[in-house]
Amino acid sequence: MTAPTQDLKLFQPGRIGDIAIANRVVMAPLTRSRADEAAGDVPGSALNVEYYRQRSGAGLIVSEGTQIAPLGKGYIATPGIHSEAQVQGWRRITQAVHEAGSKMLAQIWHVGRVSHPALTGGLQPVAPSAVAAQVLVRAHEGKLPAPLPHALSVAEIADVVDQYRRAAANALRAGFDGVEIHGANGYLIDQFLRDGANHRSDAYGGTVENRCRFALQVVDAVAAEIGAGRTGIRLSPVTPANDLADGNPQAVFGALVQALDRRGIAFIHLIEGATGGPRDVPGFDYGWARRHFRGAYIANNGYDRETAIAAVASGRADAVAFGRAFLANPDLVQRLKTGAALNKPDPRTFYSPGAAGYTDYPTL
Ligand code: 8OZ
């Protein structure tokens, strides 16, 4: 027998670092490919504003992945946060979310090798090592194999770290409450962390400590810019997404979680299992991560009403992030409170332009 709704911790206010939240239901980052590409990957259309405003019942919204530079882009019409027009566009969104009583983080993103010159203005994608991802990248020209990336030099790595720092500064100027660093799903930071893509023999590769170096330099640069209390990171220790794997996820992500704990950042956001797929993938102990990190633990992947309520009530997580459920249910928190049925997400409209499958899902 669960407690009356008003007593359930999932629906009670809390804090994530410096950020006060009205409840512990988080809207997970969701790529929707509806930025204005012709204008330079600019978000903030009336439709984009409406989409996020509709979902402001979440205690915290994490933006869709937002590239820190043109080379950080790997999908059609994803927004950026490196130009002034992008910052002004995001301002319209964060303002609407704040007026509706929620908080919002920018998810800052660099795709690394999961891209193609057709999406980067002709630039060759970059990665820790010159090892191609065996994935197809969707460009306007069609589905294209991810090419061999350029292995970043040490000087170029420093430039990318600085792009993350500038993106974080831009995020605060755009009115975000903080930043989630995208360290998951086989993109650039994850490519440094896991040995499937990192074959370096310098200070950024080989040992666990070396493979964590880039992630921690990004975290340190972002935290120095906007404060550790507004900085968090999303990780996916065992996901096979984007053709990435590691020989010993517990070793590398365990060391990383301990290093993040020492830095006092606001949160870690863990994709438990395969992104959008099975949770029971071996290789990492999420309870261990929760116990070894003193900031907030945001749990994600395949939660429903009962498992989310239980995770927060038991203290196994401070908050639970919902992706596809939020996509299809703008009033998800209300539905979780009442136990109402959920709309089903329609994959045909995940990345299509316009309102269909974006702002037209029904509310209760
Ligand atoms: C689905 C489609 C495009 C991008 C991720 C940013 O996997 C993504 C993404 C997911 O984190």
Image (cartoon, rainbow, N blue to C red):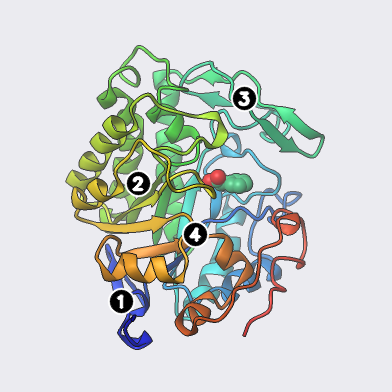
Secondary element type, mark 4: loop
Residue under numbered circle 1: 9
Say the numbered circle drawn on residue 75. Answer: none
Q: Earlier in the sequence, mark 3 or mark 4?
A: 4
Quadrant in which the N terminus is drawn: bottom left
Say the numbered circle drawn on residue 222. Answer: 2
Q: CA distance from mark 2 to mark 4?
A: 20 Å
Residue 315 pos. (x, y %): 24, 65
Residue under numbered circle 4: 28
Residue under numbered circle 3: 134
Q: Is residue 6 above or below residue 45?
A: below
Residue type, label 3: Gln
Secondary element type, mark 3: loop
Left or right: 359 as drawn, with respect to 264? right
Q: CA distance from mark 3 to mark 2?
A: 31 Å
Residue type, label 1: Lys
Residue type, label 4: Ala
Total marks placed: 4
Q: Residue at horizontal 69%, vertical 28%?
A: 117
- Residue extending farthest to the front is 1
User: Are the residues at dot 1 and dot 2 in contact (C-beta closer than 8 Å)?
Assistant: no
Q: Residue at horizontal 35%, vertical 35%?
A: 283
Q: Dot 2, how many residues are within 10 Å of its Cα: few (below 14), some (14-19), or many (20+)? A: many
Q: Earlier in the sequence, mark 1 or mark 2?
A: 1
Of tags 1 and 2, the one toward the viewer is 1
Residue 28 pos. (x, y %): 49, 59
Say whether residue 82 is visible. Answer: no
Q: Earlier in the sequence, mark 3 or mark 2?
A: 3
